[in-house]
C-alpha cells in the first residue's frame, strides 16, 4: 500500500525549502487532510485515510524530508527509510547539533501553527477529545458511552481505584468518558482548571449556590437575572437562612455598600444580562469582591467562552446554560460550572450526591 505525502505547513506559509511532511501527519486535523488530497481519496477509502491521519495526529511527530517538493505517492519501504533518516537527523538537531550552541528560533510558520492549535476554533474542535482519553477504542470521533456502571478486572483493581492508584470510572452519576471529554473541552475554552457538566443551566446555578453559599450566608445579585434563578434565590435560599441584596448591574456604589455592610459570601450576576444585555466590568467587580473576601460567579451564557473569558478577568466561577450557544442546535439541555479546581471539586461532590446528571 502506498503512503501519501502532502506539503508541510511551512510550504503553505511560503517556505520554499521543498520540505515535505509524511501522510502520518501531526500538522493538520483529520478533516482538513481528507479534503486536502483528492488523490488520496481516489486511491483509498475515506475511512482508511482518516484512520491513518488520526493515528498520526495523536500519537506521532511529523517527519520532514528534504528530498523534494509537492504532493506525491511513495512506496512503503522507501517511505520508512526516509522517515527513519529524517527522524535521526531531527533527533540529532534536538540534542544539540546547533551552530555556536545557540537555540534555534521557531520559524514564522511554526509560530503560526502554535497560534492556530491554541486558538478557540481549534480548542472547540479538538480539546479533550483524543490525547489521554481513557476509552478502549481508537475511534476518531469521541464515542458516546451509554452505561450506568463500569467493571474492574479484580478486587485489587477496585481497591487501587478507590485509593487513587488506578484511573477509571465507577458509576454513571460520578463520571462518564464522553462527559469528561466535554468537560476538558470547556475547561480549555474558558481557561479553567476544572469543569463539571450537569443536566441543565438552572441546575448548574442551583448546584453552585448550594455549594458555595453557607447556611446563614449573604449573597449579592442583580435586578437583571434569569427569572427562574431569581425565583430559586427568593424562595429556596431563605429556607437555609441565606439573605440577599439586589442591585442594578452598573451600580458599583450599591455593590460596595453591600460588601461593606454584610458578610457577603458570593456576588452572582450575568454579563451580558438576561434579557437586557447589560454588561458589568468583571475585573473591577472581582477586585471589589476579593478585597472583602467574597467570591464572584459570572453567568456567561449570553457571551459564550468565545466572546468572554470571565476567569481570566478575575471571576472565581463561570456558569453556562449549555442549552443556548454551547449546544447551538436547540436539541440539547445542559449546563456547566468552570473555575478553580478547589471550587469545582466542591460542586462536583454535591452533584454526585444530588444527581442532575447530563445524558452523554
Image (spheres, rainbow, N blue to C red):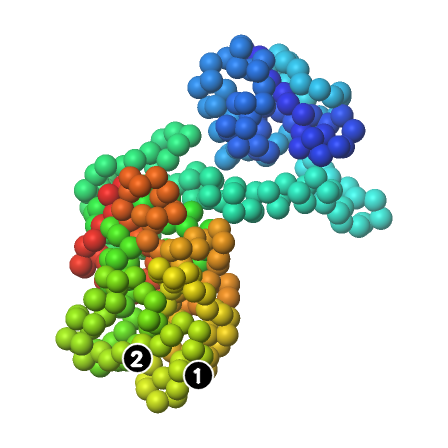
If the image is split into quadrants, where does the C terminus sit? top left
What residue appears at the point 43 percent right and 38 percent down from the top-left corner?
Answer: 130
Q: Nearer the viewer, residue 212 or 230?
A: 230
Q: Earlier in the sequence, mark 1 or mark 2?
A: 2
Marker disc for residue 179: none
In-image side of 175 versus 131 (left or right): left
Residue 128 is drawn in which quadrant?
A: top left
Q: Residue furthest right?
A: 100
Q: Is residue 104 visible?
A: yes
Q: Is residue 191 visible?
A: no
Q: Residue furthest front?
A: 276
Q: Which residue is mark 2?
A: 245
**Alpha carbon of mark 1 to alpha carbon of mark 2: how far?**
13 Å
Q: Residue furthest left?
A: 239
Q: Secondary structure at mark 2?
A: strand
Residue 321 position, x and y percent, is 32, 53
Q: Nearer the viewer, residue 13 or 158?
A: 13
Please tell me whether residue 358 is drawn above or below residue 69 in the rendered image: below
Q: Nearer the viewer, residue 309 or 162?
A: 309
In-image side of 165 versus 308 (left or right): left
Please tell me whether residue 113 is drawn above or below residue 233 in the rendered image: above
Residue 350 is drawn in which quadrant?
A: bottom left
What residue appears at the point 21 percent right and 39 percent down from the top-left corner?
Answer: 147
Q: Secondary structure at mark 1?
A: helix
If the image is split into quadrants, where does the N terminus sit? top right
What residue appears at the point 49 percent right and 44 percent down from the top-left corner?
Answer: 123
What residue appears at the point 18 percent right and 59 percent down from the top-left corner?
Answer: 353
Residue 354 position, x and y percent, is 18, 59
Q: Which residue is mark 1?
A: 253
Residue 91 position, x and y percent, is 68, 37
Amino acid at each position: 500500500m502506498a503512503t501519501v505525502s502532502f506539503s508541510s505547513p511551512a510550504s503553505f506559509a511560503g517556505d520554499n525549502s521543498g520540505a515535505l511532511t509524511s501522510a502520518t501527519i501531526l500538522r493538520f486535523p483529520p478533516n482538513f487532510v481528507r479534503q486536502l488530497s483528492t488523490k488520496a481519496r481516489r486511491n483509498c477509502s475515506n475511512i482508511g485515510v482518516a484512520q491513518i491521519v488520526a493515528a498520526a495526529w495523536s500519537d506521532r511527530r511529523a517527519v520532514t524530508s528534504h528530498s523534494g517538493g509537492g504532493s506525491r505517492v511513495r512506496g512503503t519501504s522507501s517511505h520508512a527509510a526516509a522517515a527513519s533518516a529524517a527522524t535521526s537527523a531531527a533527533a540529532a538537531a534536538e540534542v544539540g547539533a546547533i551552530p555556536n550552541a545557540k537555540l534555534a528560533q521557531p520559524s514564522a510558520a511554526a509560530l503560526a501553527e502554535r497560534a492556530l492549535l491554541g486558538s478557540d476554533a481549534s480548542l472547540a474542535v479538538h480539546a479533550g477529545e483524543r490525547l489521554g482519553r481513557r476509552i478502549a477504542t481508537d475511534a476518531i470521533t469521541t464515542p458516546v458511552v451509554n452505561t450506568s456502571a463500569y467493571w474492574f478486572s479484580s478486587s485489587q483493581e477496585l481497591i487501587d481505584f478507590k485509593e487513587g492508584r488506578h484511573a477509571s470510572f465507577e458509576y454513571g452519576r460520578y463520571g462518564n468518558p464522553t462527559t469528561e471529554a466535554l468537560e476538558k473541552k470547556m475547561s480549555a475554552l474558558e481557561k479553567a482548571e476544572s469543569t463539571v457538566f450537569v443536566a441543565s443551566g438552572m441546575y448548574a446555578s442551583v448546584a453552585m449556590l448550594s455549594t458555595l453559599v453557607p447556611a446563614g450566608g449573604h449573597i449579592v445579585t442583580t435586578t437583571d437575572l434569569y427569572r427562574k434563578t431569581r425565583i430559586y434565590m427568593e424562595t429556596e435560599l431563605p429556607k437555609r437562612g441565606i439573605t440577599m441584596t439586589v442591585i442594578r448591574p452598573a451600580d458599583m456604589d450599591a455593590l460596595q455598600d453591600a460588601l461593606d455592610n454584610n458578610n457577603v459570601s458570593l456576588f452572582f450576576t450575568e454579563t451580558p444580562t438576561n434579557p437586557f444585555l447589560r454588561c458589568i466590568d468583571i475585573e473591577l467587580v472581582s477586585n471589589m469582591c476579593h478585597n472583602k473576601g467574597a467570591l464572584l460567579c459570572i453567568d456567561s451564557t449570553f457571551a459564550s467562552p468565545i466572546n468572554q473569558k470571565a476567569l481570566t478577568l478575575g471571576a472565581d466561577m463561570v456558569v453556562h446554560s449549555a442549552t443556548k450557544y454551547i449546544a447551538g442546535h436547540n436539541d440539547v439541555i445542559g449546563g456547566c460550572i468552570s473555575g478553580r479546581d478547589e471550587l469545582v471539586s466542591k460542586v462536583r461532590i454535591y452533584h454526585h450526591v444530588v444527581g442532575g446528571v447530563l445524558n452523554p
